Amino acid sequence: MSAKNEVTADENQEEKFKKDLALIEAALYVAGRPLDTKTLGYIIGSRSKKRVQQLARALIEKYRQLETPLEVLELEDERFVLQLKTEFSARVRKLAVRPLLSDGPLRTLAYIAYRQPIVQKQVVDARGAHAYGHIRQLAEMGLIERKSDGRNKILRVTEFFSDYFGLSRDIKVMKRQLKKTFNELMKKPLSSDEEYDFNES
């Protein structure tokens, strides 16, 4: 191969890399939730998980260098997400045109997610009778699931919940992520024996 052809080949590879990087960025932006390597591979027309990871990690570094309010994260289960950084989300959340949930159901959802699996009665005792309506709404939205255990109903969040909020599907990891988020939002660390206040309506 001549030097000229080699240069052309390198330029083509660079252009394809930029195009694929842009496609992955666009996919994460439009999805608004974590996407796995298989889905991202389909978007760029590649079956190579290594190629997808290379591109997604390049995108992570790109956003890190830009120092914007947005960030791209790699989750534990080989998924990637484009999201607003935690320190900005609390300040601008009210500007969302159509928020997913109002404060009441959102607090009930956070309580369930952090304490799952949890008996429905415990949620109602902690959150009040209005929690019945919250639980029904959350189940209809696919954010939680209810399973009967004798006379009790056991609540836990779904994979859709994890994907929508950019959390791990592993419960232990998810709870660590939630605790970190709660600490950042409350602006102070909590010891292991302190309780998070989910009891406001």
Image: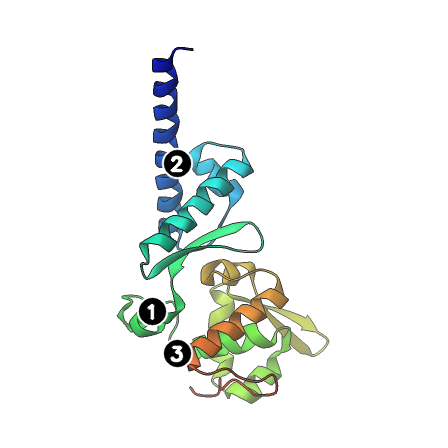
Residue in the image at 34% along x and 14% along y: 4
Tell me which amino acid carries mark 3: Asp
First in sequence, mark 2 or 3: give its number. 2
First in sequence, mark 2 or 1: give its number. 2
Q: Indicate the quadrant where residue 67 lies.
A: bottom left
Inter-mark Cα distance, 3 to 1: 18 Å
Q: Nearer the viewer, residue 171 or 120?
A: 171
Quarter placement of the C terminus: bottom left
Q: Position of residue 188 (x, y in %)?
A: 46, 83
Q: Residue furthest top?
A: 2
**Can you tell which of label 2 and label 3 is closer to the viewer?**
2
**Can you tell which of label 3 and label 1 is closer to the viewer?**
1
The residue that label 2 is drawn on is 20
Q: Secondary structure at mark 2?
A: helix
Residue 103 numbered mark, or none: 3
Q: Position of residue 196 (x, y in %)?
A: 52, 84
Tell me which amino acid carries mark 1: Phe
Tell me which amino acid carries mark 2: Asp
Inter-mark Cα distance, 2 to 3: 39 Å
Residue in the image at 35% along x and 53% along y: 65
Q: Please indicate, yes or no, whether residue 135 appears anywhere in the rendered image.
A: no
Question: Horizontally, is 195 left or right of 92 in the view?
Answer: right
Mark 1 packing: few (<14 Cα in 10 Å), some, or many (20+)?
A: few
Question: Horizontally, is 88 left or right of 185 in the view?
Answer: left
Inter-mark Cα distance, 2 to 1: 28 Å
Q: Nearer the viewer, residue 36 or 137?
A: 36
Residue 75 numbered mark, or none: none
Residue 88 numbered mark, or none: 1
Residue in the image at 60% along x and 77% along y: 115
